Image: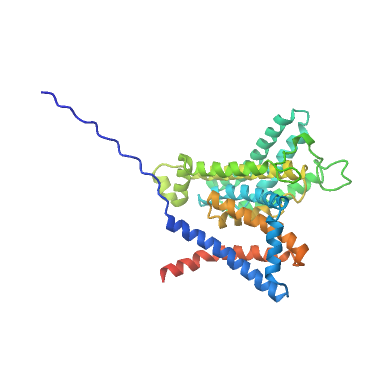
Amino acid sequence: MTTTTKPIPKPERAKPRIDWRKLGGRVFQAVLSVVLAMLIGALLLLVSGTNPLTAYRSLFYGAFGTVDRFAETLVKATPLLIIAVSVSICFRAQVWNIGAEGQLILGAITSTWVALTFSSLPAPLLLVLSLIAGAIGGAVWGGIAGILKAKMQANEVITTSMLNYIAVYLLGFLVRGPLMDPNGFNFPQSALIKESLELPRLIPGTRLNLAFVLALLLVAGAMVFWRSTIGFRTEIVGASRRVAKQIGLSVGGTFVLVTALSGALVGMAGWGEIFGLHFRLIEEIARGLGNLGIVVALLGELHPLGMLVSSLLFGALVVGGNAMERNAGVPFALVDVIQGAIILLILARTYFFKKASAS
């Protein structure tokens, strides 16, 4: 008599469940931070004798009122989104990379140098090479801080800050020396790249270019990254370095990986600024984008989609702030006040909400 044994069914893999309550709480906190910052701005407008509704109407219309203005908002949001996605990779691993400005500068320098040095190459090939060069420049600059942290336990906040200063002075030296345009009337800038290397415009007549598509691809790539094995290991290192060591993960290697990867993405943002907007290396290429990109990442809760929304918000503040200054006679400094208020509320909201939940 033969007995048949039924095969033991394999356990189904648990599907990741979204904690909608926690997600909704974070969204509420972010929205509340923005609303409170706008209310602070409204109070300042009232004190200065300006109607807040008129001023904010000018700001909104200036950022979204026409296709051209909305396109300009996307232009301003593009580098902020790329920087936010890049630094979020470090932040989620508990590595505080605040060197995005320097990494953007290095990406701009290396990509411009490749475009000017190898100008005889076919334009499509040179465009790809310049993008790779920009990514390598940013990766090297970010990786330095990662290596110092992994090998010498150097504080990454200090090292990335110092690397920012070095990058700024290096840029100043290059645009006044080896890379200075001989026909530029002694202005601190490089020669123009070839016209065939300029990124295509997505909307004719506007400055919106292919760099925005690159930013969206990086958002999608970040979502895939955090669902991959490497992304999961990175989050383990960020959650507990002791646990990561016990299960055999290389904590030092993760530091180098996330800083180099983050720097590479920021270097691509530098490439986009050169090949999509300025078409030459200029001294003010960073314009405080690094610090603002970090705020965008924090407001977006380090989630790719959240950072997409927050980058549009800050892009709208910049573009709409200029329109508000022209049409309503409001100083652009008020936009800086609103941005600063958002930063303070982002830093304070965790404390206040934790106290509220504990009481």
In-image side of 195 versus 320 (left or right): right
Rendering quarter of residue 205: top right
Q: How is the image coloured?
A: rainbow
Is residue 173 visible in the rendered image? The answer is: yes
Q: Residue at x 71, y 67 (%)?
A: 55
| Residue 278 percent coordinates (x, y) | 76, 45
Name the quadrant of the C terminus: bottom left
The furthest residue to the front = 66
Tell me: residue 133, above or below residue 54.
Answer: above
Question: Going by the image, does 277 lie left or right of 82?
Answer: right
State the quadrant of the N terminus. Answer: top left
Q: Name the residue rendered at 66%, 54% in the picture.
A: 315
Q: How far across and how far down the image is residue 3, in percent? A: 14, 26
Instruction: Give the residue at the far top of this rendering.
Output: 1
The x and y percentages for residue 339 are 64, 62
When asked about the image quadrant of residue 334, the answer is bottom right
Q: Position of residue 351 (x, y in %)?
A: 49, 66
